Structures are given as structure tokens and as C-alpha cells.
């Protein structure tokens, strides 16, 4: 059974930082491209960042220079370090694992940026 479990969300003030984690099980983690998406209330889910099996990364323009995605294959875990957070970053953040035509999603973790 495939499971992706996100953690690390919470309430943070503008300008603050959070690190999200996504622990995977039931997949061959090192062969999956891993990504983070987010969905704000009333909005469509949007791409945030991706890291490939070869550790190449790409980011949405809105988070470039502020967010960093990384992975530790030995721990079956992908991370999202979020710095200089803004109220517009408020959303539920989802982890996705992809291999070929198969995608798996986590249940999401809430990030709220507010003073």
C-alpha cells in the first residue's frame, strides 16, 4: 500500500520559515520524481517545486529564491524548506510521487502565514 505522509505545516508569521516533510512508503522512492503542490481556498491546486531522480530541481516563479526542495533517498523522504514566507503562501501543501504514468498523492498539510 502506497502512503505519502506530509508533516511540518503550521502557523507562521510573515517573513518566517517552515520545513515540510513527506515520508513515502510502498513505492521505490529513489525511482520516483517527487513534487510539492499547494491549494489555497477557492483556488486550483498549483505546482510549487519538483525534484527528479537525478536531483534536478525546478520551481514555480512565485517561490523561486525562497523555497528549496530536497530529497534523502535513504529516508524515503522529500523536504520543502520555505523561507521568507508571505500571506499568499497560505495553502494546503501536498506531496506527489510520480513514476511513468502513475501518480500518488499525500493527504496534505496546512500552512498558514499570518500575523
Image (cartoon, rainbow, N blue to C red):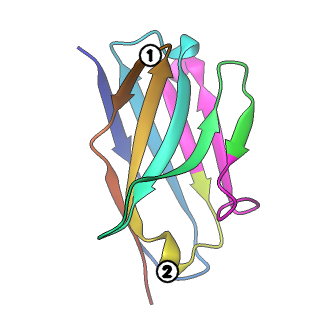
Packing grade of label 2 (10 A; few <14, some 14-19, many >=20) is some
Q: Secondary structure at mark 1?
A: loop
Q: Secondary structure at mark 2?
A: helix
* Closer to us: 63 or 19: 63
* Closer to us: 14 or 35: 35
Instruction: Please check the rendered image and state whether residue 65 is part of the magenta-colored stretch, yes or no.
Output: yes
Residue span colored magenta: 59-80
Q: Name the residue beneath numbered marker 2.
A: 87
Vertical placement of residue 78 versus 109, above or below: above
Q: Position of residue 73 (x, y in %)?
A: 58, 19
Q: Residue at x 68, y 49 (%)?
A: 59
The quadrant of the image that shows the N terminus is: top left
Q: Name the residue beneath numbered marker 1.
A: 101
Vertical placement of residue 43 versus 29, above or below: below
Q: Is residue 56 visible?
A: yes
Q: Is residue 9 visible?
A: no
Q: Position of residue 5 (x, y in %)?
A: 32, 36
* In this rendering, position of residue 34 left or right of residue 112: right
Instruction: Please check the rendered image and state whether residue 60 is part of the magenta-colored stretch, yes or no.
Output: yes
Q: Residue at x 43, y 84 (%)?
A: 114
Q: Earlier in the sequence, mark 1 or mark 2?
A: 2
Q: Residue at x 65, y 54 (%)?
A: 60
Q: Position of residue 74 (x, y in %)?
A: 56, 17
Amino acid at each position: 500500500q502506497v502512503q505519502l505522509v506530509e508533516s511540518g505545516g503550521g502557523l507562521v508569521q510573515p517573513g518566517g520559515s517552515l520545513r515540510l516533510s513527506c515520508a513515502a512508503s510502498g513505492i521505490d522512492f529513489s525511482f520516483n520524481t517527487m513534487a510539492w503542490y499547494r491549494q489555497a481556498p477557492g483556488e486550483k491546486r498549483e505546482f510549487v517545486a519538483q525534484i527528479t531522480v537525478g536531483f534536478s530541481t525546478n520551481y514555480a516563479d512565485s517561490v523561486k529564491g525562497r523555497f528549496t526542495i530536497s530529497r534523502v533517498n535513504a529516508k524515503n523522504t522529500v523536504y520543502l524548506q520555505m523561507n521568507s514566507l508571505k500571506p499568499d503562501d497560505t495553502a494546503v501543501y501536498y506531496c506527489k510521487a510520480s513514476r511513468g504514468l502513475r501518480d500518488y498523492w499525500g493527504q496534505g498539510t496546512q500552512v498558514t502565514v499570518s500575523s
